[in-house]
């Protein structure tokens, strides 16, 4: 068995702990797994502030890769974590082996989360930020009925998302385009228009591998064994 260096990156409002079931499974398979905590979220919510933007979260992951001296990294991003791993891959292209997007944003240079989210979500996020002092967007109300009961506590660490991470446009040099191995995994249940369009786009691109799973958006908690298997088979 080949041991890989796998870095898992959370999405908006999330806690790095939401990766625990998948991370544990990948470690049992012999991989080295790292789950960086993003500034202002989850167990680092005490650091929240208006200064936290997309570059901050990209720097969080780059900092972990540098501190651990990692190379040949397989980067996995969920939801808005796709923005982060794209930025990391652009800065550290020579260290990144593959990219895995789980129902995630796949940005191009100059795009922000709100640019990619569509008018309705963008306007509601702007309104929510305005009601919250302009610095953050509270987590949306979401049903977790498809998450197994024994894993549902991993949703308790959800925190307000720093608003600047949603409005800052990503700056990409294009270096990330050199990374040939790319996988997109789309949620097949209650699929949002945002990620459905991304799935359709990458599915038509021969440079990508893509697939759909019978899960809602929180697939790493709804079906952790399946997601663990998909990641293991792709990076193997």
Image (tube, rainbow, N blue to C red):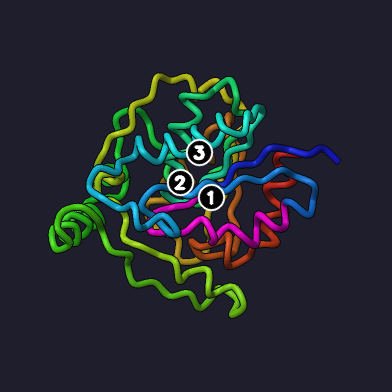
Q: Looking at this view, is 57 or 225 the one in front?
A: 57
Relative image position of residue 6 (x, y in whole percent): 65, 41
Image location of residue 145, percent across then percent down? 50, 78
Q: Residues within 10 Å of mark 1 (few under 14, many from 20)?
A: many
Over which residues does the magenta segment extend? 10-26
In the drawing, what numbered circle is on residue 81?
A: 2
- Separation of residues labelled 3 and 1 (CA atoms): 13 Å
Q: CA distance from mark 2 to mark 3?
A: 17 Å
Q: Magenta region, mostly helix, strand or loop?
A: helix
CA–CA distance in space, label 1 to label 2: 9 Å
Placement of 6 over or under 177, stated as above or below = below
Q: Nearer the viewer, mark 1 or mark 2?
A: 2
User: In the displayed image of the protein, which residue is found farthest to the right?
Assistant: 1
Report which residue position mark 1 lands on. Answer: 102
Secondary structure state at the residue bearing disc 1: strand
Q: Residue at x 36, y 38 (%)?
A: 56
- Left or right: residue 34 versus residue 91 is right
Give whichever of discs 1 and 2 has the lower sequence position. 2
Is residue 108 shown in magenta? no
Quarter containing the C terminus = top right
Comparing 66 with 206, the one in front is: 66
Q: Residue at x 63, y 33 (%)?
A: 73
Circle 2 or circle 3, nearest the eye: 2
- The residue labelled by disc 3 is 202
Q: Is residue 12 magenta?
A: yes
**Is disc 3 placed on a helix, strand or loop?**
helix
Cβ–Cβ below 8 Å for labels 1 and 2? yes
For discs 3 and 1, the disc positioned in front in the rendered view: 1
Residue 103, compared with residue 131, is above or below; it is above
């Amino acid at each position: 068995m080949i041991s890989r260096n796998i870095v898992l990156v959370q999405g908006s409002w999330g806690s790095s702990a939401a990766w625990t079931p998948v991370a544990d499974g990948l470690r049992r398979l012999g991989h080295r797994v790292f789950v960086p905590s993003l500034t202002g979220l989850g167990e680092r919510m005490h650091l929240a502030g208006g200064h936290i933007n997309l570059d901050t979260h990209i720097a969080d992951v780059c900092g972990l890769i540098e501190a651990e001296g990692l190379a040949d990294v397989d980067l996995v991003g969920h939801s808005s974590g796709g923005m982060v791993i794209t930025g990391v891959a652009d800065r550290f292209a020579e260290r990144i082996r593959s990219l895995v997007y789980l129902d995630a944003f796949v940005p191009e240079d100059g795009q922000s989360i709100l640019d990619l989210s569509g008018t309705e979500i963008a306007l509601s996020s702007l309104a929510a930020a305005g009601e919250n002092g302009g610095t953050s967007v509270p987590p949306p109300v979401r049903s977790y009925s498809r998450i197994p009961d024994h894993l549902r506590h991993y949703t308790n660490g959800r925190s307000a998302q720093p608003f600047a991470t949603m409005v800052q446009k990503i700056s990409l040099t294009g270096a990330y385009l050199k990374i040939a191995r790319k996988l997109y995994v789309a949620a097949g249940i209650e699929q949002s228009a945002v990620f459905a369009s991304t799935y359709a786009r990458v599915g038509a691109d021969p440079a990508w591998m893509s697939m759909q799973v019978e899960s809602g958006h929180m697939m790493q908690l709804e079906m952790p064994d399946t997601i663990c298997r998909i990641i293991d088979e792709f990076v193997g």
